[in-house]
């Protein structure tokens, strides 16, 4: 669809504020990963926060302290619009400055999920209005420590699950160790992909697509998919599979550049 094709249902419902700086499609539709059941997600950024009588207010740790959400149905699709003001986007970018990173701010405490998701989506969105505004924010994002923050967060979580799995194996709890190893592997792969600029670890359903898009040299897709689908797992003797996965996680952790 053209930009106007996307915007037409919004304009018909008077859902595009007059002071809109940017509007862009995000999520699976922006990446070409959508399917007939997928929703359409669009972000709109204005000078001041848009408040409509039918909108839901989603709290965020910013000023203003909420994001407006409008939902409607058109063309046999569910459309979800998120309304931001420009100052909120700039505040999120400020949170991931190099100054914040060098102060030793705990990586997992920097952004809430919606904030992280928003920065991740700016890099892979489909511009409808304000292409220059979007490019400016992409350029600014590239100068921040966002990549380092999310990689450090994912590696930290991977290490936590590795330790869990090791302890569970020592205790003979191989079922729990299997689950912890799977979680460790997922977070280690997320760190690998985030290191390549493929963000979005909060949505593991797209991990395989993100892997194909990033095509990291450290691991082939076949190697990744063999572990992800537990192809070589033996329920009668899970120990070797768990140990191999944990070793792979530790190898990824040592070779992913956080800085």
Image (cartoon, rainbow, N blue to C red):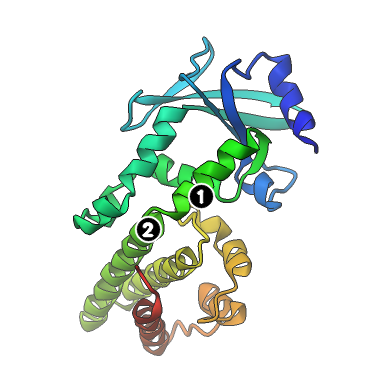
Q: Which residue occupies the foreground of this view, 133 or 54?
A: 133
The image shows residue 94 at horizontal and vertical percentages of 34, 42
Q: Residues within 10 Å of mark 1 (few under 14, many from 20)?
A: few
The residue depicted at 52 percent of the width and 73 percent of the height is 228
Q: Position of residue 233 (x, y in %)?
A: 49, 82
Q: Is residue 37 above or below residue 4?
A: below
The vertical placement of 45 against 142, above or below, is above
Whole-percent x, y for residue 216 in the image? 55, 75
User: Is residue 41 visible to the viewer in this orientation of the structure?
Assistant: no
Q: Is residue 66 left or right of residue 230?
A: left
SS at mark 1 in the image: helix
> Does the image show residue 240?
yes
Element at label 2: helix
Badge count: 2
Q: Residue at point 46% right, 29% down?
A: 86
Residue positioned 61% across, 38% down in the render: 132
Which label belongs to residue 139? Answer: 1
Q: Quadrant of the N terminus?
A: top right
Q: Nearer the viewer, mark 2 or mark 1?
A: 1
Q: Is residue 145 left or right of residue 104?
A: right
Q: Which residue is mark 2?
A: 150
**Residue 137: percent from left, percent from top:** 50, 43
On screen, residue 94 above or below 202: above
- First in sequence: mark 2 vs mark 1: 1
State yes or no: discs 2 and 1 in contact (Cβ < 8 Å).
no
């Amino acid at each position: 669809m053209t930009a106007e094709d996307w915007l037409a249902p919004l304009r018909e419902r008077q859902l595009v504020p007059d002071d809109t700086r940017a509007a862009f499609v995000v999520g699976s539709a922006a990446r070409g990963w959508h399917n007939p059941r997928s929703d359409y997600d669009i972000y709109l950024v204005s000078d001041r926060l848009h408040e409509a009588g039918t909108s839901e207010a989603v709290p965020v740790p910013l000023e203003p302290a909420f994001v407006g959400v409008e939902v409607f149905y058109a063309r046999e699709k569910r459309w979800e619009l998120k309304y931001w003001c420009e100052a909120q986007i700039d505040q999120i970018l400020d949170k991931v400055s190099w100054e914040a990173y060098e102060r030793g701010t705990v990586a997992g405490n920097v952004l809430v999920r919606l904030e992280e998701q928003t920065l991740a989506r700016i890099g892979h969105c489909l511009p409808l209005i304000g292409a220059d505004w979007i490019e400016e924010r992409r350029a600014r994002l590239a100068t921040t420590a966002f990549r380092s923050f999310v990689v450090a967060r994912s590696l930290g979580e991977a290490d936590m699950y590795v330790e869990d799995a090791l302890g569970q194996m020592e205790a003979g709890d191989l079922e729990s160790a299997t689950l912890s190893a799977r979680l460790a592997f997922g977070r280690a792969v997320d760190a690998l992909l985030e290191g390549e600029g493929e963000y979005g670890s909060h949505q593991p359903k797209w991990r395989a697509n993100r892997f194909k898009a990033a095509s990291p040299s450290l691991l082939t897709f076949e190697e990744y998919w063999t572990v992800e689908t537990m192809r070589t797992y033996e329920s009668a003797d899970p120990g070797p599979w768990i140990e191999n996965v944990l070793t792979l996680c530790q190898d990824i952790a040592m070779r992913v550049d956080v800085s």
